[in-house]
Amino acid sequence: MSKITAGSLLAGAAALVWASYYPLLYMIQGISPGLLFALPTAIGAACFIPYLKRNVISTGAVAAVLFAASQFSIIFSTELNGVVLTSTFVLFGDAVLSPVLIYALGRMQERPAMNIFFPGAAFLIISSFLLTYSSASGPSGFPGILALVLTPLLVSVYFIYLNEGIRMKGTGVLSTTFLLAALFSPPLLYIFPVGAVSLKTVAIMVIMGVTSMYAGYLLFFKAVKYTGFVLSSVLMSLIPVFAALLQLIVNHRATHSESMLLVVAACAGAVLCAFSFSRDEGMKNAA
């Protein structure tokens, strides 16, 4: 199995893990945003304790601030604009803005065959946007618009900085990122009172912590080692595809035929994107 194929599969697995966040969130609607940040972050921090190293504290501290800022922005945007519209703009940060910034900074590790990559990326990103945005309403006034502008920017800057930190100092950066980010929980819990919480809700948030705050990160940055940051980020467009399928399986919410066609188109785009890198890898090996 080639590095590109292995990395693409790992990125797809990361997208699937992160997509599970949305049906889980659907199961605990109305939960305090403060608790929704605090508990999964604390679980992620606990999972990353074995990776803790001294030389990553400063890098992890900056990443923790960026993580908290991006999560606060996502939480506030979700409160103002809803899950669908917010997730659409998070997708823009992951799949469009991050690769553009990486390319502009000259950090692209692998060069794809552009005549294959661009059509594939267009299929993947446009299909994913249509899939997420089809049921979205407009932003909620100026605060909603501001949140939608800040959210993708903060998400892309956070992941680019985290990627550079991991590239230079290893996976230990993730441990300090989540351990220090957990310190931001008390203010959120004060702003958003917790109220009554059932054991089922706690269990779901623990699962969110293990999946979205731990497993997803490990899979994504493992994929980055094989495929580079750009392809891994573009393949995150599969998140709404997997989210739609998981909603159908887990929450038994019907998916329209148009949505299924968009799922097929997005998957075809993902295959083209991966192939554009694997072809370039094959040409290098032949040379």
Image (spheres, rainbow, N blue to C red):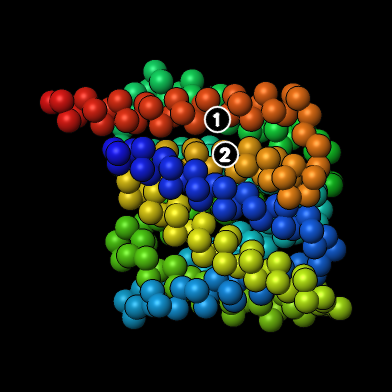
Residue 134 on image: x %, y %: 77, 32
Residue 49, placed above or below residue 159? below
Which image quarter holds the N terminus?
top left
Q: Nearer the viewer, residue 286 or 62?
A: 286
Judge whether residue 64 can be spotted in this image.
yes
Judge whether residue 106 can be spotted in this image.
no
Residue 60 on image: x %, y %: 43, 71
Q: Is residue 182 left or right of residue 173?
A: right
- Tell which circle, 2 or 1, labels the residue nearer the N-terminal end: 2
Tell me what residue is drawn at x 57 percent, y 67 percent.
210
**Residue under pointer 1:** 267
Residue that protrudes farthest toward the top in the picture: 115
Secondary structure of the residue carrying tag 2 is helix
Figure quadrant of residue 36: bottom right
Q: Is residue 38 left or right of residue 177?
A: right
Tell me what residue is drawn at x 57 percent, y 61 percent.
211
**Residue under pointer 2:** 238
| Tag 2–tag 1 contact (CB < 8 Å) | yes
Neighbor class of circle 2 (other Cα within 10 Å; few <14, some 14-19, many 20+) is many
Residue 145 on image: x %, y %: 75, 45
Tell me what residue is drawn at x 36 percent, y 43 percent.
6
Amino acid beneath label 2? Leu
Q: Is residue 95 left or right of residue 149?
A: left
Q: Nearer the viewer, residue 157 or 246?
A: 246
Figure quadrant of residue 173: bottom left
